[in-house]
Image (cartoon, grey):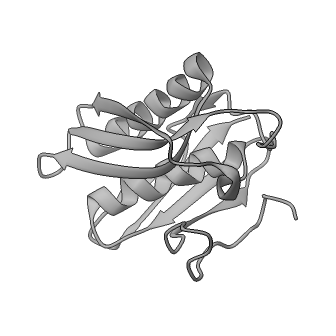
Amino acid sequence: MSVLGATTTGTRKRGLPSRRWGFFPTTADVGIWATGPTPAALFEALGLGLFALMTDLRKVRPREERAVSASGTDPSELVVAFLSELLVLYDSEGFVGRAIHARPVGNPPTAVVASVSGERFNAARHSVRTEVKAITFHDLVFDPQRGRARVIVDI
């Protein structure tokens, strides 16, 4: 099944939370959308969407935990900074997250502290889906009042 165009609202499977994220195609990149009732839920869903774009989360085990923090002058900058930190975690350690617990700071949020559970990428068990190069500001939406967010990533 192709990752692009996948809708991901649904029921729980294999210990994964009911998914609140998915993907949408753009001209040369890929978008990640998320829904959630709080800013924390939106950060968590965007982060899981990022990891799911890179590998099949059903194969990732929550064996280890990493702390991630980010800050920004406004919520949009914070989204890019947070997802960029997750991308650095993947690029530098090969760490793939399966669960994220985020705690935004401020209203509107200008910082986030998160705990990411997962494991190092293992080519014998994890598939490579899409290589993500960077997180962009292009058409970024972070709207906690409406419970939605979207970000485009450079692939």
Seen in the image, is 105 located left or right of residue 52? left
Across and down, in percent, residue 30 comes to 71, 48
**Above or below for 149 versus 145:** above
Q: If the image is split into quadrants, where does the C terminus sit?
A: top right
Across and down, in percent, residue 33 comes to 55, 61
Extreme residue toward the top, this view: 92
Q: Which quadrant holds residue 111?
A: top left
Across and down, in percent, residue 79 comes to 39, 42
State the residue in front, 149 or 7.
7
State the residue in front, 155 or 68.
68
Extreme residue toward the front, this view: 63
Seen in the image, is 81 located left or right of residue 133? left
The residue lying at 31 percent from left, 41 percent from top is: 114
Residue 35 shows in this picture: yes
Extreme residue toward the bottom, this view: 11
Residue 140 shows in this picture: no
Across and down, in percent, residue 110 comes to 20, 39
Q: How many marks?
A: 0
Seen in the image, is 149 located left or right of residue 1? left
**Above or below for 70 versus 13:** above
Q: Which quadrant holds residue 58?
A: bottom right
Extreme residue toward the left, this view: 106
**Above or below for 109 versus 69:** below
